[in-house]
């Protein structure tokens, strides 16, 4: 059996190709630490800026009353602000549009009278919907005053607050933190595995099949007494390994990023993450994803075998990336779960099964069904590769 | 020894190819019922103009292509029915064949020795002999991609001969090579002949054919136009030299068609 000899030679050859090493090891390893580092820095700088930003708030009121007074004396913890009086709402709206003020309040006449009569005051809040967070800031200010004045009214009316509160809702989440993380963000892990697995397979598949044809090395290889299926399996082994390595290095990069983040994330979150990344979980993850990577290799190889040039192969396989990897995004939607139907859909089934695995809510019958579907598809793809590689017209240009 | 009998090869045409060839036929016959034989210790020239079917014939002999019809016997082995076994007895060198640029000559020769099932002991002996003969020691551990065309051709020779094949097929081995590199190939063919190997040699350069070959087969449009010894070819020549005679035979066939 020459499969291993071919595999070792192709692996050596592949690892000496800078482009493949970049796509297989360097980019997957560095992308998450880099992206997350930049993301953390940018988001923390935005948060800091937002917290420190002094808001200019416009006020239109016909009299300086209690509400004006309350707004002017909001606690400092609610953020820095500066009030600017306006005579009418037209000027107020124009100022918001030009961003000279961020929020505007219109307090109608007789507001003090309404307050004394214990009637509601209709406050209009002006804001620019595209300036995110401004409406929330206005709500915070007004809710603070609302709560304070409510308490005062209960006291004046001598009402026990509990008597006018017929229901007190107590929410108890029966899902564990692990399940929450698994169901809500668990789709991310298989997605990156699939995306990088596909990318990792792509260049070796093209290089080891179309590349051999282009360079004219395939002809001499086919005159050796090694059966074609052994040549195919040796080469395919390298394509699959490259996909798995790219996916592994991306996970490694993600793990390093999480470790890097650990000083900023809560210890509870970090404990859940380290619980998830147990050896048994990693074993199961690879077991689920292995047939998927074989499937990727199996659909790329016939294309690479048939293509006449590297460019042609790349132009067919690259768009396939979208078709294959897009279904993996289904894992991002919290409502979609593994069932008898989704277990039959390739790629989607593995993503959902991995999500269940992370959440610890695996239903074995469904997982076996999903695994079976992928093994069947991977075998079909391998058979297709074999047929194409056996065909002399495809192999020799 | 090579025995080729009634060998034919047809290829299916794609819609695009039919359009390009201006035909409605679904297949094209590249080699049409050809027969010839090559004896050990002799060099057999396979000649023909471009598109004559030479490369297809050589690819069938080297078992890359399966014939549509006919038989090929290599060293007593049926190369159609038992291609894998026949390959062990053959070496195939083409001018257009590439090498793995990211491997060193040493690694490449080792790899092919393994694929041919050569024992480590035999491999080391033959490698040493070939590296000495071709003066390859200085660059045996350099990446092939960094070698000159002449050095690469030496590596190709080494790869072809590492399993000591009894039958060696050369498909335009000197095309595009400089004089010194081409001379290495010519010397290799002479060595093969002297060692009693069966050699098939395809070339466009009639000077090389005149210099090396004992037997000659001319094919055109997939059919054999001439098949005999070089002496017989020379004795029946109507043109003043080999090139002119080759052109005359091909043109005569064109006129018949």
Image (tube, rainbow, N blue to C red):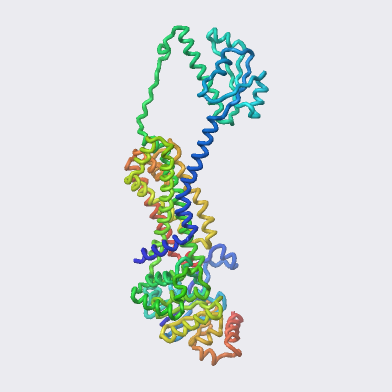
Query: Can you tell which quarter of the image residue A71 is in?
Result: top right
Q: Is residue A97 visible?
A: yes
Quarter that holds the N terminus of chain B: bottom left
Give B87 or A215, whichever is nearer the viewer: A215
Query: Can you tell which quarter of the image residue A69 is in?
Result: top right
Coordinates of residue B156 in the picture (x, y in percent) = 47, 74
Coordinates of residue A38 in the picture (x, y in percent) = 51, 42
Coordinates of residue A129 in the picture (x, y in percent) = 58, 29
Give B240 or A221, whichever is nearer the viewer: A221
- Residue at the bottom extreme, as displayed: B235
At 62% from the left edge and 26% from the top edge, which residue is drawn? A101
Q: Is residue A141 above or below residue A278?
A: above
Coordinates of residue A328 in the picture (x, y in percent) = 45, 44
At 39% from the left edge and 41% from the top edge, which residue is drawn? A355
Q: Is residue A304 visible?
A: no
- Give the tally of numbered discs: 0
Q: Is residue A287 left or right of residue A57?
A: left
Q: Is residue A71 left or right of residue A165?
A: right
Q: Is residue B77 above or below residue A12?
A: below
Q: Is residue A379 left or right of residue A80?
A: left
Quarter that holds the C terminus of chain B: bottom right
């Amino acid at each position: 059996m020459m499969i291993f000899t071919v595999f070792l030679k192709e692996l050596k050859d592949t690892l000496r190709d800078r482009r493949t090493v970049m796509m297989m090891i360097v980019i997957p390893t560095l992308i998450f630490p880099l992206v997350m580092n930049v993301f953390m820095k940018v988001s923390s700088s935005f948060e800091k800026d937002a917290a420190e930003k002094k808001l200019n708030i416009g006020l239109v009121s016909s009299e300086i009353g209690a509400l004006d007074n309350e707004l002017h004396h909001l606690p400092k913890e609610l953020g820095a602000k500066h009030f600017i009086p306006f005579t009418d709402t037209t000027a107020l709206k124009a100022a918001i549009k030009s961003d000279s003020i961020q929020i505007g309040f219109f307090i109608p006449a007789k507001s003090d009278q309404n307050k004394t009569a214990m009637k509601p005051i209709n406050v209009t809040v002006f804001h620019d919907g595209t300036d995110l967070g401004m409406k929330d800031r206005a709500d915070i200010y007004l809710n603070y005053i609302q709560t304070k004045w409510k308490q005062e009214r209960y006291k004046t009316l001598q009402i026990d607050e509990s008597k006018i509160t017929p229901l007190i809702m107590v929410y108890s989440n029966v899902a564990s933190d692990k399940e929450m993380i698994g169901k809500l963000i668990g789709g991310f892990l298989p997605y990156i595995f699939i995306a990088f697995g596909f990318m990792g397979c792509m260049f070796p598949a093209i290089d080891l099949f179309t590349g051999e044809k282009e360079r004219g090395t395939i002809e001499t290889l086919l005159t050796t007494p090694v059966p074609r299926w052994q040549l195919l399996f040796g080469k395919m082994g390298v394509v699959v390994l490259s996909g798995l390595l790219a996916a592994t290095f991306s996970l490694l990069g993600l793990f390093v990023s999480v470790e890097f983040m650990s000083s900023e994330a809560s210890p509870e979150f970090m404990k859940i993450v380290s619980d998830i990344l147990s050896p048994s979980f990693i074993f199961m993850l690879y077991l689920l994803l292995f047939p998927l990577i074989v499937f990727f290799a199996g659909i790329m190889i016939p294309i690479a075998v048939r293509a006449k040039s590297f460019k042609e192969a790349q132009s067919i396989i690259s768009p396939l990336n979208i078709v294959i990897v897009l279904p993996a995004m289904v894992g991002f939607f919290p409502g979609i779960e593994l069932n008898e139907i989704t277990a039959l859909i390739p790629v989607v089934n593995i993503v959902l099964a991995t999500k269940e695995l992370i959440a610890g809510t695996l239903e074995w019958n469904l997982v076996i069904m999903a695994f079976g579907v992928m093994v069947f598809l991977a075998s079909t793809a391998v058979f297709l590769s074999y047929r194409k590689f056996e065909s002399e017209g495809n192999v020799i240009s | 020894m090579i025995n080729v009998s009634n060998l034919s090869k047809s290829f299916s045409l794609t819609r695009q190819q039919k359009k390009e060839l201006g035909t409605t036929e679904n297949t094209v016959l590249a080699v049409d019922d050809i027969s010839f034989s090559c004896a050990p210790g002799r060099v057999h020239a396979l000649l023909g103009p471009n598109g004559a079917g030479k490369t297809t014939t050589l690819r069938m002999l080297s078992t890359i292509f399966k014939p549509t019809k006919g038989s090929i016997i290599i060293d007593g082995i049926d190369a159609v029915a038992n291609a894998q076994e026949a390959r062990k007895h053959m070496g195939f060198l083409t001018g257009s064949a590439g090498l793995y640029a990211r491997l060193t000559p040493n690694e490449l020769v080792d790899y092919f020795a393994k694929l041919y099932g050569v024992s480590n002991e035999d491999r080391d002996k033959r490698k040493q002999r070939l590296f000495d003969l071709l003066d390859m020691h200085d660059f045996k551990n350099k990446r092939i991609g960094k070698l000159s065309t002449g050095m690469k051709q030496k590596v190709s020779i080494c790869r072809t001969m590492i399993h000591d094949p009894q039958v060696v097929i050369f498909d335009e081995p000197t095309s595009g090579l400089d004089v010194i590199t081409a001379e290495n190939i010519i010397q290799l063919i002479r060595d093969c002949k002297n060692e009693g190997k069966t050699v098939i040699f395809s070339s466009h350069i009639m000077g090389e054919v005149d210099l090396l070959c004992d037997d000659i087969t001319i094919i055109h449009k997939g059919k054999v136009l001439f098949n005999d010894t070089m002496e017989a070819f020379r004795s029946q020549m109507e043109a003043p030299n080999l090139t002119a005679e080759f052109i005359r035979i091909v043109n005569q066939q064109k006129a018949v068609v």
